[in-house]
Image (tube, rainbow, N blue to C red):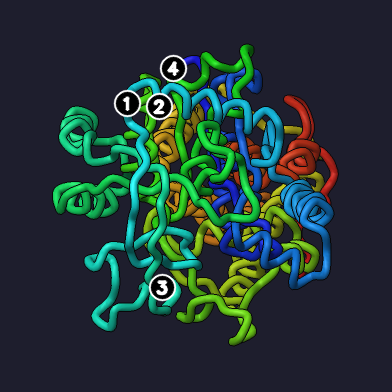
Amino acid sequence: MNKIYLTTPIYYVNDIPHIGHAYCSLATDTLARFWRKKLGKKNVFFLTGVDENSQKTVEAAKKNNKEIDVYLEDMSQVWKKTWEELNISFDDFIRTTEKRHINTVNKILQKIYDAGDIYKSKYKGKYCSGCEKFLKDSELDENGLCPEHLKKPEILEEENYFFRLSKYEDVLLDFFEKYPDFLLPEKRKKEVLNFIKSGLEDISISRENAKFGIDFPFDKNHKIYVWFEALINYLSALGEDKKNVWQNTHHIIGKEITKFHCVIWPAMLFSAKIDLPRSVFAHGFFTINGIKMSKTLGNVISPLVLAKKFGNDALRLGILSSFEFGNDGDFSIDNFTNFYRTKLAGGIGNLFNRVVTLLHKFFNGDKILFISNKEENKKFKNQSLANFDKLLEEKKIKAAIDFFLKIQDDANKLLNETEVWRLAKTNLEESKKIFEKLLIYLELITEISEIFLPESFPEMKKIIGDEKKVGETKILYKN
């Protein structure tokens, strides 16, 4: 594997980013940083962006008393600048109103049309405006409501263009059997397989009465259904110089859009005779103190507010350590604050200051490396990094963070249990062995911090110094 392509979903611009959006983007960014460290920066391509061709956009622009073009420009900049302020290192930011996207959409639809998979017909079904899709009865709750928006879908009857999704039912089942790791976690794959086995129906891919969107290339009286064209953004961002990364593409998404990415999208690609991405990873739902985020409840959290107070690194580690990536999970400000105080300020930050202060006090900052322990410590460090790499290769982000934090826990435990500051006063030579081990711990923490704590990483490098001497102490995280 020489190159890798990582994508977030493209986010609706009908509102500003909240902590749930940041969770997905920070997770993808963390994976991008990990692979850059392994493969080199030029071999990793990280895409994010915004989905603009939506009825939700039209409604939001009207609500804000703005022309649609002005609203889109303003909101796309809000999203882009938010990710920049959070130090999310995307390589490209795509907007679905861009010419490159529209051109790619037209090319892909032409291929699908040429395959005989687009036709015109009347359709009557239950449409959820929140999801912007038709729902089957099996997808509604026991009260006939959309389980995501808790609203009764409206009955729509339209003459639209359709995609022959049903044609690819067996093709998709064969694909999932051949590539069992295409969709993870496993429970998401089971849901998708059950959905496919329940029987696929052809889907409407145009809207005759839509006021905004990309023109349907075969009938200017129609607009392309937003979800159908939005998925193509992953290809729109690949110019001639980046097409070779597609073969190792990994989509990071929320579980609510799994069917789009693992049923409709693969079928579209099969139809267009384009290779499928390598994998899709669907993370779970994000709640605040056990309750779904809602403006009405006033529990929507801005990632920028938390980052301003605690720092970008704390936001990243605090969110991603809250629950295992792929599961549903909960976040609370109280737990986050406690995490910051105990694991960052009182953990990693305190450890660096104590060890380096003691090395200056007893050894004038000189690094003490015993030849007898050098190979043993090198082996310990390399094995630790190998174990860490394996976790992130499998996208087990929380497990990797737990592994990382255990290193600082072990270092602090060694520091406290040996009371090396006392030992150095009575047996300086014996204390050197402990300080050598502590320095190995600091080097490990620093190396992993390039991925998990990228803004702290340069300061950590300065603190641990060069091969001969440690640097000066510095407060990494304020209490």
Q: Are marks 2 and 1 in contact (CB under 8 Å)?
A: yes
> With 130 as the anchor, is 466 left or right in this view?
right
> With 15 as the anchor, is 470 left or right in this view?
right
Callout 1: SS: loop
Residue 445 visible somewhere in the drawing: no
The quarter in which the N terminus is drawn is: top left
Indicate the amino acid at tag 3.
Glu
Indicate the amino acid at tag 2.
Tyr
Instruction: Determine the CA span between mark 2 and mark 1.
Output: 5 Å
Callout 2: SS: helix
Instruction: Determine the CA span between mark 4 and mark 3.
Output: 47 Å
422 or 98: nearer the viewer: 98
150 or 202: nearer the viewer: 202
Closer to the chain start, of discs 4 and 2, is 4
Residue 300 visible somewhere in the drawing: yes
Q: Are marks 4 and 3 in contact (CB under 8 Å)?
A: no
Closer to viewer: mark 4 or mark 3: 3
Callout 4: SS: loop
Residue that numbered label 3 is attached to: 154
Residue that numbered label 4 is attached to: 1
Residue that numbered label 1 is attached to: 116
Q: Residues within 10 Å of mark 2 (few under 14, many from 20)?
A: some
Q: Residues within 10 Å of mark 1 (few under 14, many from 20)?
A: few
Closer to the chain start, of discs 3 and 1, is 1
Indicate the amino acid at tag 1.
Gly
> With 385 as the anchor, is 314 left or right in this view?
right
Position above or below: 278 against 157? above
Position above or below: 77 against 337? above
